[in-house]
Amino acid sequence: MFSLYKKAFSGLSPSTWLLSLVLLINRSGNMVLPFLTIYLTQRMHLSIAQAGVVVAFFGVGSVFGALAGGRLSDRIGFYPIQFWSLFLNGVLLIVLGQMQTMAQICACTFVTALVGDAFRPANAAATAWYSQPENRVRSYSLNRLAVNLGFSIGPAAGGMLAAISYDFLFWADGLTCILAALLMRVFLPPVKIVKGAADDKTAPATPQGPSAYKDVLYMLFSLLVTFFAMSFFQITSIIPIYFKSVLRLSEFYIGLLLAANGLTIALLEMVLVYKLEGSKPSLVLIARGLLLGSLAYLSLNLLPALGLAAVVYMVFFTFSEMLSMPFMNAFWISRSQEHNRGQYAAMYTISYSVAQIVSPPLSAYLAERLGFREWWYVVTVWCLVTSAGFMLLQRRLSAQSRAHSPL
């Protein structure tokens, strides 16, 4: 087992490890977003509907931030976008904590999300740059490990700080962003990128291939990722309500289950990716991950409404996530080149941002109208249809490759 872990983590560049450390510090301070709706309703005395509007502003800012981050990464490089996104996002989070009116909060939330989410496509492009083709998927999995460890730390620490004062949330989140930016600047110096062929990082610029927005197969892939993300975001919207109101779990146990998701991914995903990488096409592995996702939601109806159902759901959901997301990264990287990698990363980020805007309110409305039992059947079928979509996309990709291969 030790040898397996050693192989899974070996061969990654020091820059990749430093980039993941920056992510870990940044995500460990992710305290404002998990408690934003509670802060708005309890501290600022906004209605639930008004809090939903603020969250929608966050989602819209995230979409524009991803677009801007991807375009600017291709034009001026991923390093300055990462640094200034982290630094300015830290400042804006502190400013957001000082806003008092609904209009001020909405405007500041939009700008904060726009600046903060410009980091994501730039970071994706940076990970591709610092890694080698043979370990690129594991490099992204290392980033996900850092994100999930941070996600286990941030909300827990945020809960303790919120019990003292919500003001501490904005300062802690902002200062950790600024700290991450400064650490990146000190330990990961800027690189001067001369764009060229994918295999030669010093070659003169020779753009090959279309824009990401003209890549029809990739646009279909992005649409399927949005469908996947809409089922994925049940974990942050409807699932906690179901665990509380139907399974009668306390907030403490719900928190433990969510933390177990992040810790399991941190412990097992790198090894799983190491064993599966190259065994099947990425789209096939993604489709199989969605099959596990369908079993997760189906189990909520097939098992008795007890705590065991929550545990079984979380096991299937976690392995579905580990099988799907790393290989989604592998696919979009395989479609991109040095000169348009930011565009591809932006489209991938936008797929999640759109789902984050649409999924929570739509899911809440339908779950309330249909009932939880019927809603889980809907999500089960949704996962199955999306899985079939990825398989059809793989068939189309294979047919396209055969058509262009020499006789």
Image (cartoon, rainbow, N blue to C red):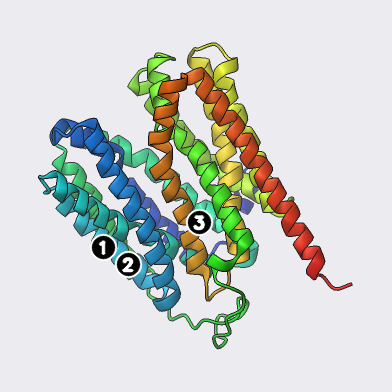
Badge 2: how crowded within 10 Å, few (<14), some, or many (20+)?
many
| Image quadrant occupied by the C terminus | bottom right
Judge the density around disc 3: few (<14), some (14-19), many (≥20) Cα neighbours within 10 Å.
Answer: many
Q: Residue at x 20, y 43 (%)?
A: 169
Which residue occupies the extreme right position in the image?
407
Mark 1 residue crowding within 10 angstroms, few (<14) / some (14–19) / many (20+): many
Can I make out residue 94 in this image?
yes
Return the x and y of residue 137 as percentages of the image width and height.
59, 56
Which dot, 2 or 3, sits closer to the camera? 3
Query: Residue 252: x percent and y percent?
Result: 34, 22
Give the answer, above or below, for where 400 lies relative to 196.
above
Q: Which residue carries the number 2 mark?
A: 83
**Cα gap from disc 1 to disc 2, whole angstroms:** 6 Å
Give the amino acid type for the residue marked by disc 1 in the picture: Phe
Name the element at disc 2: helix
Is residue 276 visible in the rendered image? The answer is no
Amino acid tagged 3: Tyr
Relative placement, left or right, of 82 versus 158 is: right
Query: Label 3: which residue?
Result: 348
Identify which amino acid the numbered label 2 is placed on. Phe
Position of residue 278 measured from the top left corner of the image (x, y, whole percent): 71, 55
Which label number is shown at residue 87? 1
